[in-house]
Amino acid sequence: MTDLKGALIGCGFFAVNQMHAWNDVEGARIVAICDRDPERLKTVGDQFGIERRYSDAEALFSDGRFDFVDIATTVQSHRPLVELAARHKIAAICQKPFAKSLADAKAMVEACQNAGIPLMVHENFRWQAPIQAVRKALEENAIGVPFWGRFSFRSGYDVFSGQPYLAAQDRFIIEDLGIHTLDIARYILGDVRAVTARTKRVNPKIKGEDVATILLDHQSGATSIVDVSYVTKLSREPFPETLIELDGSDGTIRLTPGYQLEVTNARGTHTLDVSPKLLSWASRPWHNIQESVYAIQQHWVDQLKRGGEHSTSGADNLKTFALVEAAYDSAAGHLTVDVEAMLR
């Protein structure tokens, strides 16, 4: 089959990783890019040899000649751009966070369903090699039925140096980082019935919260804790690793710093190195995330060609997005939020 042709909208900080990954993906290539900033448009266009360059998304879609669009802009523009793709019947990938509100996210999913086009959210963390290894161990029944979990991302890394706009956001760590960790919890332990959350702002130089602790009641009966922090100083900086603890009826799983997967059950304790690959264009410590960008984009192409459902489809991501909204509602009101009611 011939390669699928893609267009990228948004040439900012993270989009460069996506462009590198598209170069490695089999079965697709980017043929056009779009950004309102002429300098970023030229930089990315020159770096990756893209001749078709647009400063206006309407003009990009009017010219057409591509099979899918990768929307790598900030959240304010996601709904209009996804709905623009739906009107032109172009399959769409949308960067996270999916939307400004759950109502917007539902409208975006409905627009694409009505247009008959696939919609996938670029929720790449579940595609990290260590996370996939944890999921595989569970699927192989290594610890029986899981009843408790902890999904932890605690760091003192200066994320504002590369993304200074994050410091000005009213909602920070849950929306930017916690959304990934919540998605991992859903991916590993299943959908969630109720959420209880608490947040703090420790860094006085930022506007939003930089610490969050979230209790999840899963539909399976399991309980988990999602805890995220960008103000935790450790002797060894674990950024950008997500650490996982799982207790099951027949054993335990621990994903520890340095990408070590420890499984304990009746056969004893076995430790595996589940480190991500260092791709040719990647750099430490970002290589874990960078490899997952390649993995999710390859998944997009493979499923698009076979007509299959995407792991992080728009419909699936509504369930993760609802957890973000529930966490903020819970923290604001010091209450437990019924997630299933939010999705009705």
Image: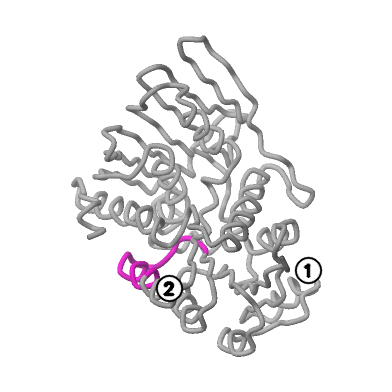
The residue beneath circle 2 is 112
Q: Residue 104 is drawn in which quadrant?
A: bottom left
43 over 238 or under it: above or below: below
The x and y percentages for residue 173 are 43, 51
From the top left corner, tell me how far across and down residue 317 is, in percent. 41, 57
Q: Which residues are magenta?
A: 95-109
Q: Which mark is residue 48?
A: 1
User: Residue 104 colored magenta?
Assistant: yes
Instruction: Tell me the residue at 20%/45% (across/down).
Output: 336
Task: Reply yes or no: does residue 135 show up in magenta.
Answer: no
Q: Is residue 24 left or right of residue 67?
A: right
Q: Secondary structure at mark 1?
A: helix
Q: Earlier in the sequence, mark 1 or mark 2?
A: 1
| Nearer to the camera, 180 or 166 | 180
Q: Disc 1 versus disc 2: distance between alpha carbons? A: 29 Å
* Circle number at residue 2: none
